[in-house]
Image (cartoon, helix red, strand yellow):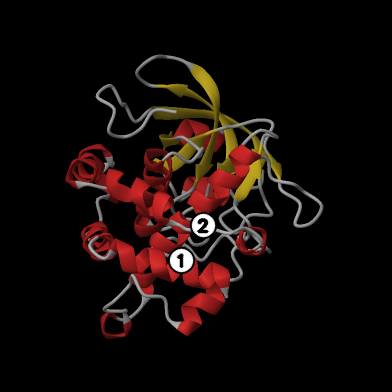
Amino acid sequence: MTKLTYQKYRLPVVEALNSFDLFETGTTAPMAIWGVDSDTGERDRFVVKFKKHNRMTPVSSAFEFLGAWMAIEIGLPAAEPVVVNISDDFVSTLLGRDGYKAASQSLGFNFGTRYNSGITQIPQIGFKLNDTMLEQAKLLFAFDLFIQNIDRGHQKPNVGTNGEELFVYDHELAFSFIHQLPFLRSKTPWVLSSAESELYKKHFFYKRLKEEQIDFTAQVDKMDCFNDYFWNEVFTKIPKEFQVDKIKYVISYLKLTLDHRSEFVNSLNKIIAS
């Protein structure tokens, strides 16, 4: 999967053609579509999250791009982000069908991902992680606590598998600190409070990782990839419709944790051991 910082990286812009499924169980009700890459003419399947539907805003769309790029950059298998253009012609194909209203209100660019078949949800019990998935689960746990993603719990894991490795998606609720009043945000985000520790004990992989003897130093070291070059590429590649000011605050806040990585490692080690 191509990383944002690769020299030949290109964010695909996809023209929506028609729909073949609607994921009604998701809060944001993503729609599976056929689309065509505007640059290459390649026809493929994609998933779009309409920017004017439940919980989707320019900010949450921006966070979807940012979360996906960060996951891929750090080495996690994640849904490849694309831009999906919703046109009047596409909306007309949905007349009288579920999803018509959301699509009709979301003309223009929307966040989307390339469709991945063969991904199944991981059972909460009775499923054994292979060595590859175990290493990915360690990295994902550290990554989610770093970006303060509260949306990967037991009820809604937002992680699946193809049987060989994990597959992560959905980051519109990541960077949860941004929704707190400024004076309530932690001044030491690299140190987890008791309330935060209890919250992240609901992470989908917490109980599985608790059984292991884990030191998260190696996982946090991988976060060196979130450097100035990476952040510059974010601003270069993200569509202007989603270049929200909150991205700058997210970056500065995350840098605080990276400036105190040893303390952050200690926080991760402490929560998984408690």
Dot placed on the residue nearer the N-terminal end, 2 or 1? 2
Q: Position of residue 142 (x, y in %)?
A: 46, 57
Q: Is residue 174 above or below residue 85?
A: below
Q: Position of residue 221 (x, y in %)?
A: 34, 50
Residue on which disc 1 sits: 268
Specify the amino acid type for callout 2. Answer: Phe
Q: Tag 1: Cα neighbours inside 10 Å, few (<14), some, or many (≥20)?
A: many
Q: Is residue 7 left or right of residue 95?
A: left
Do labels 2 and 1 touch, CB within 8 Å? yes
Q: CA distance from mark 2 to mark 1?
A: 9 Å
Specify the amino acid type for callout 1. Answer: Leu
Say which of 150 and 219 sits in front: 219
Q: Position of residue 143 (x, y in %)?
A: 44, 55
Q: Is residue 211 above or below residue 126?
A: below
Figure quadrant of the N terminus: top left
Q: Residue at x 61, y 36 (%)?
A: 165
* Mark number, residue 104: none
- In this view, the residue farthest toward the front is 213
Q: Tag 2: Cα neighbours inside 10 Å, few (<14), some, or many (≥20)?
A: many
One can see residue 246 in this view:
yes
Say which of 179 and 157 sits in front: 157
Say which of 96 and 192 sits in front: 192
Q: Quadrant of residue 257?
A: bottom left
What SS does tag 1 mark? helix
Q: Is residue 18 above or below residue 194?
A: above
Figure quadrant of the C terminus: bottom right
One can see residue 95 in this view:
no
What SS does tag 2 mark? helix
Residue on which disc 2 sits: 141
